[in-house]
Structures are given as C-alpha cells and as structure tokens.
Amino acid sequence: MDDLKGKVALVTGGSRGIGKAIALKFAENGVNLVVNYIRHRREAEETAELVERFGVKCIIVKANVADDKHVKAMFERIRDEYGRCDFLISNAASGVLKPVMELDSRHWNWAMDINARALLVLAQQAVPLMDGQGRIIAISSLGSVRAVENYTAVGASKAALESLVRHLAVELGPLGITVNTVSAGAVDTEALKKFPNRKIILDTALARTPLGRLTSPEDVANVSLFLCSKPAEMIHGQTIVVDGGYSIRA
C-alpha cells in the first residue's frame, strides 16, 4: 500500500506472535517501526532485524505499558527518533489464567492495567504526534464476548478494551483519528501455550471454523494493515472479528 510508505507505527508487544506479524506486515508496506517489548529483548532484536530487511527504520523500546512513566518515556524516544506516530497498535497483553474463585484483586488489576488501561495512556501520548490523521488499533480476543475456561480476568479486560475503543472513537474522530478493534479467533502463539487446556481450545476451534483452519498472526496483521489504509478511513469504532467464522456457529 503506497499510501503508507514513510509513516511510523508503534506496535506494543511487538517482539513475537501477533505483534511481530503486524510489525513485519507494516514494514513490508514501507512503514517505519517502533517495536515495544518488556521481557523478550532477543526476540525484539530479531524482529527489528527482519523489519529492517524491508528497507525501513526500526527502533526497539523496552517499556511496561501498564506503567505510565514507561509509556511517557517511550513516546519521548519516538518523538526524538521520528517526530511523529501515525499508527498505534495496542497489542501487548497479559493476565492470569485462573478459575473465578481463585482470582484476587492483584490478578484483576494486572489484567486490567495491561490489557485495557494501557490503551488510554498510549492514546493520550500518541494523539499529539498523529497530526490529525492517525489510526489506533487495539488487538482483542473472542474471550471479550464468550466465556472461556480460566479466562475471566483477561476476558473482562478485553471487554473493557473494546468499550474503551468505542469511547475513544467518539472523542478522537473529530480530530481525524480512527479507532478500531481487531478481535482474533484462536491463534496458536506462545501466549496460548500458557493455557492448560491449549489442545482442547485449538482442536475445538479448528472443528468449529467453517474455513477449515485456525486464525494465524498474519491474518490479524493483514486486517490491521487494511484498517490503517485510506480505503478503511470510514471504518471507525468497530470490532472486526478475524476468526474464519468460528464465532458464528451456534
């Protein structure tokens, strides 16, 4: 997409999985990158190397998106390096996988801070660098609307994230900034390996998906890229589900 060349995208949690796929897809289309990470520096460096093979610039920034000071420092770096941020992809996510009766306030706050509140602070920092034409995309999951075993805290935080996207859309739309959610089906990433029932989740998703395969990180990246293109400029405040039809089954 030629209209994206030379622009700048921040991808939080961009060192691996869906975030990595998004970073590479944007780089392939001429977008300069900021790859955010918190623990996996080696993977972030590897992602940056792959990004730069497309002839674009990439910086990696360690920052905990749940920490306001970290986020502000990250945007100071972006301002110094690029002077702009056209696309914000809020992808970083975390949370404890426990039954309801085993959750405590620490588990709850952890998921809410990283998966939902972070988008608010990220947007507040990104908007001044968007020059009235930015795009904000939040990556969510079907656990925001469907009950998934042991997913209570994360699912609730993803529902909060999607609600926040709609509120941001109303307030930021007049500034020329679109805000949307991409909600992915079952994607076999490193994060999913933490689920004790991973195999059941994947087998069930595959059996129930009309298109006959699981959602890939690249599928999510393709939709994210489209939402940042000119043809998508009137898609605003929406949750776009990328799951091969899994969620439409009764």
Image (spheres, grey):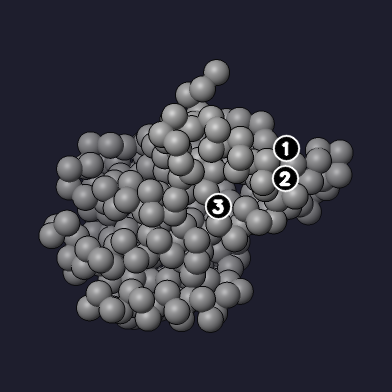
Furthest toward the right, the residue is 101
Q: Earlier in the sequence, mark 3 or mark 2?
A: 3
User: Is residue 225 placed above or below 24 in the rendered structure?
Assistant: above
Residue 72 in the figure: left or right of residue 230: right
Q: Tell me the SS state at disc 2.
A: loop
User: Is residue 11 placed above or below 170 in the rendered structure?
Assistant: below
Residue 144 falls in which quadrant of the image?
top right
Residue 136 visible in the displayed image: no
On the image, numbered disc 3 is attached to which residue?
Answer: 188
User: Is residue 247 placed above or below 141 in the rendered structure?
Assistant: above
In percent of width and height, residue 153 lies at: 70, 43
* Three-letter code, disc 2: Asn
Which of the two residues, 120 or 193, is positioned nearer the viewer here? 193
Q: Earlier in the sequence, mark 1 or mark 2?
A: 1
- Residue at the location (57% across, 75% down)? 40
| Crowding at mark 1 (Cα within 10 Å: few <14, some 14-19, many 20+) | some
Which of the two residues, 188 or 2, is positioned nearer the viewer here? 188
Q: Whole-Å distance between the Cαs marked 3 and 2? A: 12 Å
On the image, numbered disc 1 is attached to which residue?
Answer: 149
Residue 84 falls in which quadrant of the image?
bottom left
Q: How many marks?
A: 3
**Mark 1 against mark 2, which lies toward the viewer?**
2
Q: Whole-Å distance between the Cαs marked 1 and 3? A: 17 Å
* Three-letter code, disc 1: Glu
CB atoms of marks 3 and 2 within 8 Å: no
User: Is residue 235 placed above or below 224 in the rendered structure?
Assistant: above
In percent of width and height, residue 1 lies at: 17, 56
On the image, numbered disc 2 is attached to which residue?
Answer: 197
